[in-house]
Amino acid sequence: MLRASIPTSIEIRQDISSTALVEADPNQMHQIVINLCTNAYQAMPERIGVLSVTLKDITLGDEAVRGNAQQRPTTPNRPLCAFIC
């Protein structure tokens, strides 16, 4: 999906370690990922480099939400973290 719009001088790496499902409009999610990746590659000097896309499960506890690093067990509605860099 990305390869057609990103120059071949940019390597695309993916690390999708989550199996979670997201309740969202698939077209909107597609557009978000495309926009973020396009912004990332346009920020690369000389349009050469590696674009990494990562999606993983994370665990946030009540304290972490308030800025503390304490953790709690993962719940069925676990948050996801996406990195595009």
Image (spheres, grey):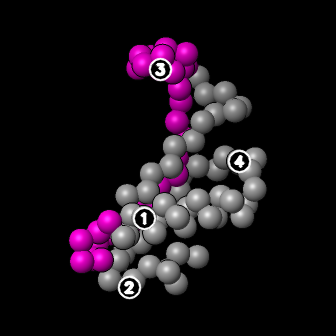
Q: Is residue 66 magenta?
A: yes
Alpha-carbon span between mark 1 and mark 4: 23 Å
Numbered label attached to residue 22:
4
* Residue at numbered disc 1: 39
Q: Is residue 32 magenta?
A: no
- Of mark 1 and mark 3, the one earlier in the sequence is 1
* Residue at numbered disc 3: 64
5 or 57, which is in the foreground? 5
**In the rendered view, does 21 fall on the left or right side of 14?**
right
Across the whole image, how many numbered discs are drawn on residues? 4
Alpha-carbon span between mark 1 and mark 2: 16 Å
Kind of residue indicated by mark 2 = Thr
Residue 73 visible in image: yes
Residue 80: quadrant of the picture: top right
- Crowding at dot 2, Cα within 10 Å, few <14 / some 14-19 / many 20+, comes out as few
**In the rendered view, does 39 fall on the left or right side of 32?**
left
Say above or below: 5 vs 18.
below
- Of mark 1 and mark 2, the one earlier in the sequence is 2
Alpha-carbon span between mark 3 and mark 4: 22 Å
Say above or below: 67 vs 10.
above
* Residue depicted at x 46% and y 69%: 38
Residue 61: quadrant of the picture: top right
Do tag 3 and tag 2 residues touch (Cβ < 8 Å)?
Answer: no
Kind of residue indicated by mark 1 = Asn
Q: Secondary structure at mark 4?
A: loop
Kind of residue indicated by mark 3 = Ala
The location of residue 15, given as percent across then percent down, is 47, 58
Do tag 1 and tag 3 residues touch (Cβ < 8 Å)?
Answer: no
* Residue depicted at x 46% and y 65%: 37
* Residue at numbered disc 2: 8
